[in-house]
Image: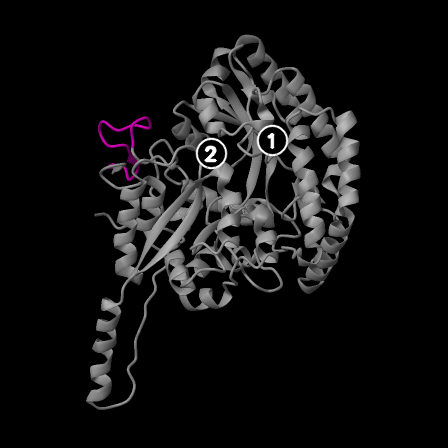
Amino acid sequence: MKKRLSFLSSIVALTVIVSGCGSENDAASPKKQDDKKTEAPYELTVAFPVKGAIPKDMQLVNDEINKIAKEKINATVKLLPISYSAYVNQMNLMMTGGEKLDLMVEWGAFYSSYIAKGQLLALDDLLNKYGKDVSESLGPVFLNAPKVKGKIYGVPTIRDLAQDYGFIMRKDLVTKYNIDLSKVKKLDDLESVLKVLKENEPSMAPMTNKVTSSLYGSFSTRDSLGDDLGVLLNNGQGELKVVNWYETPEYADMVKLMRKWNQAGYAIKDVVTNKESENTIIKAGKAAGNLTHMKPGFAEQQSKIIGTEMTVVKLAPAAANTSTVNSVMWGISQGSKNPEKAMQFLNLMYANKEIVNLFSWGIEGKHYIKKQDGLISYPTGVDENNTGFALNQGFMFGNSFLADIWEGNDKNIWQETKKFNESATRSKALGFTYDNTQVKTEVAAVSNVVSQYRLGLEDGAFDPDKELPKFISELKAAGIDKIIAEKQKQLDVWAKENNVK
């Protein structure tokens, strides 16, 4: 087999020095090794969210991962895939109920809440002892981005750590209706495209939302500072002043635009209660596209997932902040019975190419094959419709830059993504994560208000002239100003400590 290279992989050399003299020390070493070999492997419960159906060959892939994990660290894993829509609630139930849970994907939006509830282990000591490849692959800036009060409770996956924003849609429709996407420069410009689709494709909605998100979704020109309960405008490039995002003119203009688009019939029906992923909806011909954050190779990625060629139009520049870095992380549950083994397996996800390929593509020879040009593709007789493993979530599993590259993508996609991460505009607050412990009560109350209004407003289902003032009023009554003041206080301290102005 060809030698596999990755610019973020590392080689670890361990030298064991046996001190002392005489036959007692010489005899002790092999005995310890024998003890380790006979020790029963610890089974790790590893939870992560899945878009769409759970692949039918998930257990086969699980078995292959276990062969490597058992050999490398004397552990096995029990993969626990959970649907996107149920994932956050299921994690809370498992951690609150004391169920067996070792490693878990952490969404950045819920990170502070997990910490405030004491549901996550601090990883600093474990990283020092067992996470060398995690630390070296991420580097100090991105490794330290999730720090709260000097402690790390999650490690970001290596992927697009910055984001640019735009609209992705079926390319055949662009060609069919001679749509000139070069004229679409900003969000408002998209309306002309949606109008053409509405008029000519009556059985298809021009746009959909992402599951559990709104039409507006992740489109952003702000640094959310983790949860949107107090943000920095202009991608954190200006004054380090925390403001109420929902009270800004920018937010008001956006929800009015979403209302206009919804009433014009540009959104899928029942958009507020939609539980289907955008990929499933577009693949089924129910919608043409969606607003989304993007990265190098995103159109090619989505084309493979959806099964038809997709194209993108960029509507906002690439930006990096703590939220984009921390959007997908791995953490160890406070209830883990063996956090050392959990960290050892997590380290494999940042160092072992075979592990990363299994999570990303499945089993070589069954779910994919390597081609002479170095790319990979489906084996003969297998495609996206009949493969037993089409998870397509490589971004979620450790160091995705270790994965082989699927045909149709640029051979240099990982190098391009690395450049993308390095060249993106960075928020002044990159590395700041606030601790909401002092405002837990207010965060819970404000979050309840957000859940009542946000989707309805951002999907255009609510009349913003009537509902937005109510939303802002209830946010204030629930304590958002206290949250913002606490966040500002912590940001000021962080900025002083890090010499950020």
Tell me the distance, in whole angstroms, between the alpha carbons under discs 1 and 2. 20 Å
Sort mark 1 into few (<14), some (14-19) or many (20+) by Cα contacts within 10 Å.
Answer: many
Q: Which of 278 and 326 is in front in this view?
A: 278
**In which image quadrant can residue 269 be found?**
top right
Q: Which of 54 and 248 is in front in this view?
A: 54
Region of the chain picked out in magenta, as a range: 371-387
Q: Residue 138: x and y, percent?
A: 47, 55
In this rendering, would 181 be left or right of 441? left
For residue 154, above or below residue 415:
below
Label 1 sits on a secondary structure element that is loop
Q: Residue 401: x and y, percent?
A: 40, 47
Quadrant the C terminus occupies:
bottom right
For residue 9, above or below residue 13:
above
**Residue 474, magenta (yes or no):** no
Q: Residue at label 1?
A: 214
Q: Is residue 445 visible?
A: yes
**Residue 377, magenta (yes or no):** yes
Q: Residue at label 2?
A: 298
Q: Which mark is residue 500?
A: none
Q: Residue at x 34, y 53 (%)?
A: 77
Identity of the residue furthest to the bottom in this view: 22
Label 2 sits on a secondary structure element that is helix
Q: Which residue is drawn at 33% across and 33% down?
A: 407
Type of residue at label 1?
Ser
Type of residue at label 2?
Phe
Q: Nearer the viewer, residue 223 or 80?
A: 80
